[in-house]
Image (tube, rainbow, N blue to C red):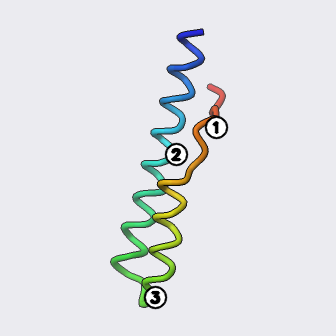
Amino acid sequence: MTDLFFQMALSNACLALALAIVAMIAGAKAKRPQLAHMLWLLVFGAPGDVVLES
């Protein structure tokens, strides 16, 4: 049970980190702030039950 919780937490953190990097790059390079805002909403609204199988 603890391993599953740890795997879910680690998967969520990795997904949020990847989306945050994309959002930061889009915010710096894009001419449209709406795109960066939408990507940041995805970062903070990413589902917590995503499990990446190893």
Within 10 Å of disc 1 (Cα), the crowding (few <14, some 14-19, many 20+) is some
Residue 30 position by quadrant: bottom left
Secondary element at tag 3: loop
Per the image, label 2 sits on a secondary structure element best described as helix
**Residue at image x 56%, y 28%?**
8
Disc 1 versus disc 3: distance between alpha carbons? 29 Å
- Contact, mark 1 vs mark 3 (Cβ under 8 Å): no
Residue 27 x, y percent position in the rendering: 38, 76
Cβ atoms at labels 2 and 1 below 8 Å apart? yes
Total tally of numbered discs in the picture = 3
Q: Earlier in the sequence, mark 2 or mark 3?
A: 2
N-terminal-most mark, 1 or 3: 3
Question: Hey, what amino acid is under mark 2?
Answer: Leu
Amino acid type assigned to the residue bearing label 1 in the image? Val
| Residue that badge 3 annotates | 32
SS of the residue under disc 1:
loop
Q: Earlier in the sequence, mark 2 or mark 1?
A: 2
The residue tagged 1 is 50
Residue corresponding to mark 2: 15
**Is the N terminus in the top left, top right, bottom left or bottom right quadrant?**
top right
